[in-house]
Image (cartoon, coloured by chain):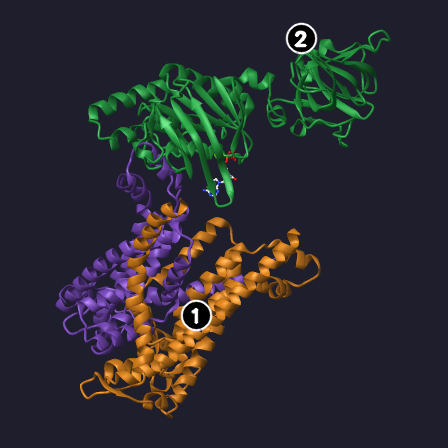
Chain colours: A purple, B green, C orange
Amino acid sequence: MKRSRFPVLVTAAVLLFFYAPIVVLVINSFNASRFGGSWEGFTLKWYEKLWNNDDIWSALWTSLGLATLASLTAMVLGTLAAFALHRFQSRLQKIHLGTLTVPLVMPDILMGISLLLFFVALGVPTGFTTIWIAHVTFCLSYVTMVVLGRLQDFDFTLVDAARDLGAGRWQTLRRVVLPLLAPGIIAGGLLAFTLSIDDFVITFFVQGPGTTTLTLRVYSMMKVSQNMPVINALATILLALTFAVVTLSFKLTRKQTAP
Amino acid sequence: MPGFLSFENVTKSFGAVRAVDDVSLDIARGEVFSLLGPSGCGKTTLLRLAAGFEMPDSGRILLDGHDITHLPPETRPVNTVFQNYALFPHLSVADNIAFGLRVAGRNKKDIAREVDAMLDLVRLRSEAQRKPAQLSGGQKQRVAIARALVNKPQVLLLDEPLAALDLKLRQHMLAELRAIHEAAGITFIYVTHDQTEAMGLSDRIAVMNAGHIEQLGPPAEIYDRPRSHFVAGFIGDANFLQGTISAISSRSGCEIDVPDFGKVFSAEQMNLPVGTCVEAIIRPEAIQLLQPSPDVSTSTNTCDAVIDDIIPLGTLTRCIVRMNGISLTAELPRKMLPAGVAKGSRVLVRLDSASVLIMPRNDGTPAAGNHCLDDDKSVVIP
Amino acid sequence: MSAAKNIPSRRAEWLLTLPSLGWLAVFFVAPALIVFLLAFKTADATGGVSAGWTLDNLRALADPQYRPILWRTFWISGTTTLICLVIALPVSFAMARAAPRWRNFLLLLIIIPFWTNFLIRVFAWKTLLQSDGLVSQLLDATRLFDESPTLLYNSGAVLLIMVYTQLPFAILPLYAAAERFDFTLMDAARDLGASGFRAFRSVFIPGISRGLGAAALIVFVATIGMYVVPDIVGGTDSEMIGNKIAQRAQGDRNLPLASALAAALLFCVLLLLILCSSAFRRSEKLDNALKGELQA
Ligand SMILES: Nc1ncnc2c1ncn2[C@@H]1O[C@H](COP(=O)(O)OP(=O)(O)OP(=O)(O)O)[C@@H](O)[C@H]1O
Ligand SMILES: [Mg+2]
């Protein structure tokens, strides 16, 4: 009985489809040609332009600060939520789980517009704070799910063991529970961090004057200035960073094996 | 005698299940006390009550005269060796052992010294820096014991500590546990459902069933003088014969009438009237098999039988013998078998009257004739 | 007695639950309700919301300006979903049948684009498809067309890039289902005389139907709310409802109208979620009933 090659061929084609545009983009970031249609020699001048672009630098710092704050907040809220979901089986937790699941499938644009309307209705001026709130809102569910997955593998007799050996609640948390869950919580935080850095649509709605994130800046460069090669260079750097973060969180979420 | 660790009418329910049902128990200082019973009978729950992981619904728990019923686990001078060891996977062997001392805020030098002493006691000095995932089952088990013992608990609770080990290692660890108990001299409460473990280790055993204690006593007494059908069946193998008391002699014992077998005499002194429905319990090794000969066949405690099956067990041989409607299991050394017996041979069965135990059936209600006999006249619990 | 034990644990449950539930109640549930509320308000001149109530915004949805856009949103999303599923099916099949080492590697390869910034992925296509970009140069080289066709700013480009961005979301749930699929069933079908394709169609596809449902839902819901793709590579004849919401909200600042459009979209999404979750629950119940019968 011969197995059909067809699925394998489709898979290969899909991978080509996925990576060809990205590879072309990376190559073009080193291309001296301004429009990238043909190869006109190797250059680093786009990276140099990027380096000297103050707007991008300030947008980068805004994004990093925002992502750090948002992911830390989501880590704390999400960890508490995961504990609640794991420990208790009540009606309250059913509602809790439902409320945490819907944001995962809600289209970005609805989350963005509804938050904007909410802030306008309350008379809250949009800006850094409103972006932070929006980012925590959409990261929270992801962090919760990652930590919850980790908790399901957690052996709760270890808590009994720690109490038995004389550790109080706080010491048990600090010496046993948190160290063992740390990889999961950090992986959740990294996910939140990348989601926050990556977000454009929701940020677009709740942005305010004076706060420009990296994606907002990239968008305006794409729409307005035709400064394509600089965007290529920026995209290449972001790609490299994303790969690093993905690899790291892949290592963290994999089951801990003895060194 | 007031115990060192006492349970007073302790009851604990989970929903409709009474996991521990009005248990009162006194455990002496320094003894190895075993809780033995089938799965789900409440052994772990009783241990968790002593450790402080569960609070009783009613009753008290006293340690050395102090009421500890409502103390949280971390403040009780009691430590547990968990069934799956519950070693902290992120800490090395040495750090696992040091855990209790660290949370107690002891100084670094003391901790290092005591951890070293423990590593020597359980012979894990060369594994001190390994993580639990890099240890064998027996080594993990020793770390779990060391981690508990280093806190110098007044009572060590062990919940089926050997259940996860294979037979050879289990026998070895049993010997080690005995040695550790001798060296440390503290009270052990040992939970198991393996009777040979309990017999080999304990000063006293409590046999539990459905949340209450069926019988409590030294291992030999529990084996030789089970006080209930459940205990007799659970500890060791037993043959059960149903009968009625037909005669009583105040000095030498009583005689019971067992249908299909005949008269059975027991040396046990029973305060039961003639006509009581009783159950005779006979251990397999208390049954002798003899060459059939006409002169002994009529006497008490003997009966003609046919060999149904012969199963060699190593040093002993197990024979299933059948007489009329009942069958008995006998175990005896090979050389005690009558010469040339085989499946289908006729033999003479003799019960050792000193080893026939008698206990009332169905609360011992006296009944006329043989009313109390039901269809299955003999139950053999292998 | 057990009540006494329940009180602190009840309090612990609330302490653990309240931060996240409270946050989402305020910043997720309340805003969603406000969307429905503001749809009945009138706009004021400064881009805010005035006090009066009106049904005009809902009427505007039937306006010739918006009706075709609603239709287009649905057909682009539907077509994208269909294409994604058709491509994802053989891919998930091939991945699930691959050797375990390959499987994880392939999974990683599928996930990486999904972690790459969305704007950048769309932008990469824009460079490829622009008038003197690589693709048009390749097309010119084939000399199939007298005049090189415009590749950007039309519905075709929107569809292509939608599929590009959504394909990982279709592959992942399908792969998760296919990984759990018992492939000896395929062999059994072949053994009974079915062709490879026949076995794929009548054994594999029904076997992973739940993953198929999940993939369809995820892709469809994500695409009907799409804004970036039509905005960057689409033209005026390929606008979707998301573009209109953004224009009303951030362009000419008519928030009540944006709210009415969002309410219509939110209504569709919630309806879909409710339908799917009840369908899922029904199929789960059926599963359990079947299992119970087998055990009996
Ligand atoms: N946390 C709990 N919630 C509900 N029921 C429980 C709980 N812990 C124990 N039980 C029930 O209490 C009874 C006694 O359980 P326990 O664990 O004490 O048994 P055990 O004697 O240790 O059994 P095993 O030999 O299988 O370990 C069982 O019926 C069990 O189902
Ligand atoms: Mg147990």
Residue B149: % across, % down: 34, 24
Q: Which residue is mark 1?
A: C219
Give the residue type that dot 1 points to: Val
Tell me if the residue at label 1 has its CB under 8 Å from ligand 1: no
In the rendered image, the residue lying farthest to the bottom is C64
Pointer 1 local density, CA inside 10 Å: few below 14, some 14–19, many at least 20: many
Q: Quadrant of residue C195?
A: bottom right
Q: Chain of mark 1?
A: C
Numbered disc 1: secondary structure: helix
Q: What residue appears at the point 74 percent right and 29 percent down from the top-left corner?
A: B372
Give the residue type that dot 2 points to: Arg
Q: What residue appears at the point 58 percent right and 54 percent down from the top-left corner?
A: C182
Numbered disc 2: secondary structure: loop
Residue A154: % across, % down: 39, 44
Is residue B258 toward the left or the right of residue A145 in the image?
Answer: right
Q: Which residue is mark 2?
A: B251
Q: Up-down: is B10 above or below A142? A: above
Respond whether the residues carrying marks 2 and 1 are from the same subunit: no
Q: CA distance from mark 2 to mark 1?
A: 91 Å
In the rendered image, the residue lying farthest to the top is B295
Q: Is residue C118 visible?
A: yes
Q: What residue appears at the point 22 percent right and 71 percent down from the top-left corner?
A: A216
